[in-house]
Amino acid sequence: MIGWFTSNETFLLTALAYYLVGLSFQVVLRSGVFSLAAAGFWGIGAYTSALLSESLGWAVAVVLALVLAGAPALGLAAVVARLRGLYLGMATIAFDLLVVSLAYGWDSLTGGALGLFGIPRSATLLSVGGLAVVATFVVAMLQSRAGGRFVDALRTDETLARSLGIETGRLRAATIVLSGVLGALAGAVTPLIFGVLGPEESGFPLVVLGLTIVVIGGSGSWAGPAIGAVVVTALPEVLRGVDEWRDVVYGALIVLMVIFAPSGLLGLARSGRHGLRRRVVRAPVTEGTGR
Amino acid sequence: MTDALVCDDVEVHFGGVKAVDGVSITVAPGSLCGLVGPNGSGKTTLLNAVSGLVPLTAGRITAHGEALAGRPVPQIARRGVRRTFQAIRLLSTLTVVENVALGADDGRRLFDGLLRPRRSARADHRSRELARDALERVGLSDVGDRLPGELPYGHQRRVEIARALAARPRLLLLDEPVAGMSVEERREIADLLLELKAEGLTQVLVEHDLELVTRITDHLVVVDFGRVIADGDPDETVRNEDVREAYLGRRHDAAGPRSHGAVRAADGG
């Protein structure tokens, strides 16, 4: 067992980093607050830990990464407070691209297009796993009980949520900040896993990755990105023989998931369980539900 | 005793459209006030103004002596002013009891699940208890664990009322709660509203079914084109000529001199 873990360490660390990326998008998709800024904050977190982990140690570097992402996340949340849906998505993608151009342009700090090399690979299953557990705890507790009902109400019907007394403005802002900090955490651990960091790693491709993970896994809870991250990490291994078809398979997978399982593998599992229970326990509902 | 709801010369304009154009209404505590009028007469806009969803162009709204106009929607809801909507607005992914519990949840305590887990567990327990009570109240005690989509239409509308009741409101605004229901279901909802009135809950009922409204309300307000055209005892009010005209339309001149409406129309030129 331990042997399997150590021989697959890179696979597991990658899956954990992907999980954190997915978690930052789960927060967004479950609440319907379409902030895609997590990719930009990933960049801030990644460069912070890449630059500081050697001199300060990985733990301090990760904490600094979260602080350096959290402060601008608060500012961003205030700036985009009035934006909804697609407009919020566009504005936050602009933020992501801003971070990418900073990474390219600020040569002296980021190494420009070449990126950073020789970053100490200090990530261990224990450290990254521990951080993932903490992040999971935070998200799971925030989405428990009334907190879960609040984000579901915000996603489904914001007007209704407000008329039920829910402070949706604060909830939206908190969602943007939480997603950003989780993105920064994912970014902070990644260069500590691979030892290198380039400017092309954050930005739009990361948004696609995060959304893919959640679309595959589901956005109902933290378990969705956990499932999605394992699938997305394992796919390249599975598709090793047909490398040139990989993107096609990715695309097809997403289309199929969206059409046949819009709430992801997690949703599929849940509705299977629910349907089964209903068939076993309850008589079928015969009356129509329409007007 | 302060009035449960006072609308004082309320105006709501959308661009050039005067959806509500100088409405003054007073609702006594514990009363069941009907609000009727043709489609597009401004009934729902007035409810939206009271619950804060649309800003007032002019006028004042107070509930139990406290000014409402200008306050954010969640604050108004937390002051005990709750409502139902014309369309069904239940969350399809939550169970019925969770939907109703949302009415009882304290919408300020957004992060208690993480920051004060024990308190959040207690509050959740309490919300679900209130939700079950409210469901029992509307006659749906055994469907709490189902999804709203599994219930027939009339029961979904009851769940909406239960969600408002779970908040234990001081003022309940009902926007066409029996629309699309069968005669039998209408009677049951009417009985429920009468029971709630007997318990002292102040209600404003927007409804098209005049027979039902005159039977259960003790005060009827008729609006047309954003203005109050009649206000008072329900039975007298529905006999009012202006009201009949607004509801039934003006009779064509060919209807003859018996028609009061025709005479008025001719007079008005």
Image (cartoon, rainbow, N blue to C red):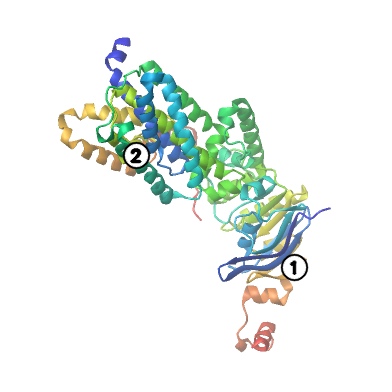
Q: Which residue is mark 1?
A: B231
Left/right of residue A281 with respect to residue B154 in the rendered view: left
Left/right of residue B255 with respect to residue A187 in the rendered view: right
In the depicted view, which residue is nearer to us: A245 or A193? Answer: A193
Percent position of residue B6, x then y: 74, 59
Report in which chain the residue with disc 2 lies: A
Q: Residue A102, labelled with which disc?
A: 2
Percent position of residue A283, x then y: 49, 38
In the depicted view, which residue is nearer to us: B83 or A124? Answer: A124
Q: Looking at the picture, which amino acid does disc 2 mark?
A: Leu
Q: Is residue A225 visible?
A: no
Give the SS element for disc 2: helix
Give the SS element for disc 1: strand
In the depicted view, which residue is nearer to us: A154 or B170? Answer: A154
Residue in view at x 21 percent, y 40 percent: A248
Report in which chain the residue with disc 1 lies: B
Left/right of residue B254 with respect to residue A282 in the rendered view: right
Residue found at the far front of this picture: A108
Q: Compared with residue A101, is residue B83 higher up or lower down, i.e. above or below? A: below
Q: Which quadrant holds residue B122?
A: top right
Q: How many marks?
A: 2
CA separation in Å, label 2 and label 1: 66 Å
Residue in view at x 16 percent, y 32 percent: A242
